[in-house]
Image (tube, rainbow, N blue to C red):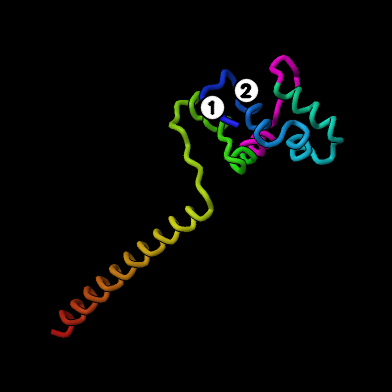
């Protein structure tokens, strides 16, 4: 299913994530596993209706964003970024994160080695000056 380019509201963007994740019954069970399937699906519908009092809380919203990330449906995250004046975020895979950390580690190790060599050189010069 192709994702919409623009959304009029956060509810529309979340609706797309929920649809891509299998629908309100499947996502409702993920958000509220203790509720019966139909009740969880109904709660999803209520949360997506701006005229209802029921809304997603912060934890539920973050869970929906993570679900979107897992299924590569970034509609809600892109909507939030665009209305807040941010550029579109790029999802990072665990492999990408590991690679970046490894590169940072290698660079930090090289810098520490260079500092150690410099300290040794300074100490050696100081010892030579003290001996004279």
Most foreground residue, 22 or 125: 22
Among the 4 quarters of the image, the one containing residue 80: top right
Is residue 56 in the magenta section?
Answer: yes
Which residue shows up at 17% across the image and 82% down it? Answer: 128
Residue most extreme to the left: 132
Residue most extreme to the top: 51
Which residue shows up at 46% across the image and 33% down it? Answer: 88
Q: Is residue 11 above or below residue 100?
A: above
Among the 4 quarters of the image, the one containing residue 101: bottom left
Q: In this view, does 102 lie above or below 12?
A: below
- What kind of element bears circle 2? helix
Q: Is residue 77 above or below residue 52?
A: below
Check contact, mark 2 vs mark 1: CB within 8 A: yes
Numbered tag placed on residue 79 in the rendering: 1
Residue 47 falls left or right of residue 102: right
Among the 4 quarters of the image, the one containing residue 79: top right
Q: Tell me where residue 116 appears, x and y as whole percent.
A: 30, 72
Most foreground residue, 54 or 43: 43
Q: Tell me where residue 69 appears, x and y as whole percent.
A: 59, 41
- Residues packed near mark 2 inside 10 Å, few (<14), some (14 to 19) or many (20 plus): some
Q: Tell me the quadrant of the picture where the C terminus can be found.
A: bottom left
Q: Earlier in the sequence, mark 2 or mark 1?
A: 2
Q: In this view, does 1 lie above or below 123?
A: above
- Residues packed near mark 1 inside 10 Å, few (<14), some (14 to 19) or many (20 plus): many
Residues shaded magenta: 49-65
Which residue shows up at 55% across the image and 25% down it? Answer: 4
Numbered tag placed on residue 12 in the rendering: 2
Which residue shows up at 73% across the image and 36% down it? Answer: 27
């Amino acid at each position: 299913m192709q994702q919409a380019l623009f959304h009029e509201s956060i509810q529309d963007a979340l609706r797309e994530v929920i649809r891509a994740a299998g629908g309100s019954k499947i996502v409702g069970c993920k958000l509220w596993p203790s509720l019966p399937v139909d009740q969880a699906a109904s709660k999803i519908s209520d949360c997506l209706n701006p005229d209802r009092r029921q809304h997603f809380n912060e934890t539920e919203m973050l869970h929906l964003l993570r679900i979107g990330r897992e299924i590569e449906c970034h509609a809600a995250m892109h909507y939030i970024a665009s209305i807040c004046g941010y550029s579109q975020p790029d999802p990072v895979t665990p492999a990408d994160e590991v690679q970046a950390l490894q590169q940072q580690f290698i660079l930090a190790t090289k810098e520490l080695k260079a500092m150690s060599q410099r300290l040794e050189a300074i100490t050696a010069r100081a010892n030579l000056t003290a001996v004279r």
